[in-house]
Amino acid sequence: MLEHCVPWPADRAERYRRDGYWRGESLVRLLADAARTHGPKTALVGAGRRIGYAELEQEVRRLAAGFRDRGIGDGDRVVVQLPNTPDFVRVCFALFTIGARPVFSLPAHRDVEIRHLCELSGAVGYVSPGLLRGFDHAALARRIRSEVPTLRHLFVCGDDPSGTADDPVVPLSEVDGDPETGDPFPVLDPSDVAFFLLSGGTTALPKLIPRTHDDYTYQVRAAGSATALTERDVYLATLPVAFNFTWGCPGVVGTLRAGGTVVFAEDPTPETCFPLIAAERVTVTSVVPSVVQLWLEGAEWLTDDLSSLRTVQIGSAKLHRNIAEQIEPTFDCRLQQVFGMAEGLCTFTRDDDPAETVLATQGRPISPADEIRIVDEEGKELPAGEIGELLARGPYTLQGYYRAPEHNARAFTDDGFYRSGDLARLTDNGDLVIEGRIKDVIIRGGDKVSAAEVEGHLQALEGVARAAVVPVPDDFLGERTCACLVRAEGAEEMLLPELKRAMQARGLAEYKLPDRLVYLEELPLTGLGKTDKKALAALLRGETPAEAGAFVPARDRTG
Ligand code: AMP
């Protein structure tokens, strides 16, 4: 196991192997097996290309040899920030092939996030998308290289407008080698880390989730069978492919394992997705509730033939019943509710569940070896029906974040259950219902925003004495982010656009910028002297709780 990662305890690892969950299968084997079985069949469609299984494997091996020839090797970490195109798959599988570990980043990430991911992982490489949606990621790559000493290899997969002859960033198209010559590819240990997912995070700095070959190949197998995925399926990857939901629930990797076809959408709008569904006869896709609302609206006026759809998975944020009820009649397909987290545990509703289960719950774990506990504040297990914190452990749920011993000590119980920070209850049938959360995270559409992270940046701005960030309800995104500030003495109050510009200038991803801004004379405090976020949320809802009496009502500067 890679250094700074926490392995499963030996007895459980042995049980997972003995019971056939972990089969010693690497992700590289998964692709090789699929290439052997489905050679000429189309594996990937996107960015103007259709790539067959055998062709994909060939391309992956050449790219792997190219990375190897440039000095990237077994155990190295490489930050991968690519949009939804076949290149994401090619790059990740090429890195798996040489034993290097991709660190998944989102296209929305900017300097702050990329620098942190490179530093935390000790990355030797960064694969950037170049110019993407008006932002020059190749220039970002050069900035980060000068700050992070380990970073030696910069690749660009697209335009490089800031490139000069004496400071080139290597175009991905030039990374090519002969897999049959040079050092042979390493023999992979399937119990070792294959890649890192980003945590939805509660901490000021995002954490990395190590995923092993064994655990991830099992996750996609279990998710694939819960979705009854076969080689006849065509999966539309429309949320960012670096999300665990899109990559492996069963998503891209599960579809490749099943021998189906993955179609990449550049964005999740109905205008982009509906024509793709019609043209490629898409059968399965996964979206967040805010996206499906756009799709429901789109279905009223777009005329694309969506009859191929058999399952729409919805997850990553709470799906309200009134939206859930519209899915099957509008798209003439099954709704599958999904609760999932990059840390592991996934629960799905199933095709043969009663309608009520599908509409009102997030279903059952995808693996019989998943262990769930709902506990009260003292950690005592609660009976079905009662709401408490959801704890989980199992064959694809992490045992610890990368390089985070102190956080791990809080985030796991002594017997290895992960504390999700979600509030949930189990129904009498064993279905999970997510009821809220105790972790300080804003779920904005499908994006997770750590309040502590944003507060750290707000606090660092000139003219801000104190800052707190709380979610405010939103019909479309579910929640939006509200920044509550106390200004420093003598400082002017900012308006929201000004605040956003200042946060952007710090190099923060756009989805983390506050949507609303209020100023207060003081932040309400709990008895322990921490910001009282419940009181703040109540104040923002227009209620004036007794505890809030001490501070002057907020001034809204959203503009
Ligand atoms: P991530 O690791 O980014 O996928 O985020 C995982 C978190 O998203 C969970 O811990 C929940 O807080 C939230 N989440 C995921 N699925 C659902 C769902 N179906 N309903 C409500 N919240 C969800």
Image (cartoon, rainbow, N blue to C red):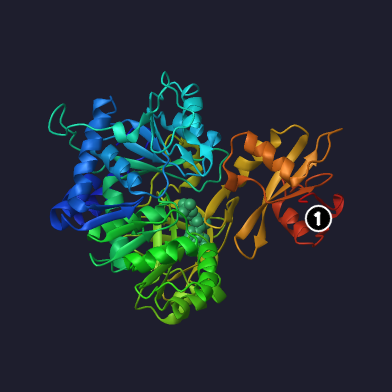
| 345 is higher (above) or lower (below) than 208 | below
In which quadrant of the rendered view does residue 346 lie? Answer: bottom left
Q: Please give the name of the residue rendered at 24% of the width and 26% of the height, measured from the top-left corner.
A: 69
Q: Is residue 211 left or right of residue 98?
A: right
Pinpoint residue 518: horizontal percent, then vertical percent. Answer: 77, 49
Q: Residues within 10 Å of mark 1 (few under 14, many from 20)?
A: few
Which quadrant of the rendered structure holds the N terminus?
top left
Q: Is residue 24 left or right of residue 405?
A: left
Q: Please give the name of the residue rendered at 52% of the width and 61% of the height, measured from the top-left corner.
A: 317
| 288 is higher (above) or lower (below) than 184 | below
Q: Amino acid at mark 1?
A: Glu
In which quadrant of the rendered view does residue 163 lie? Answer: top left
Residue that badge 1 annotates: 547
Closer to the camera in the image, 295 or 376: 295
Closer to the camera in the image, 108 or 85: 85
Check mark 1 vs ligand 1: CB closer than 8 Å? yes or no.
Answer: no
At mark 1, the secondary structure is helix
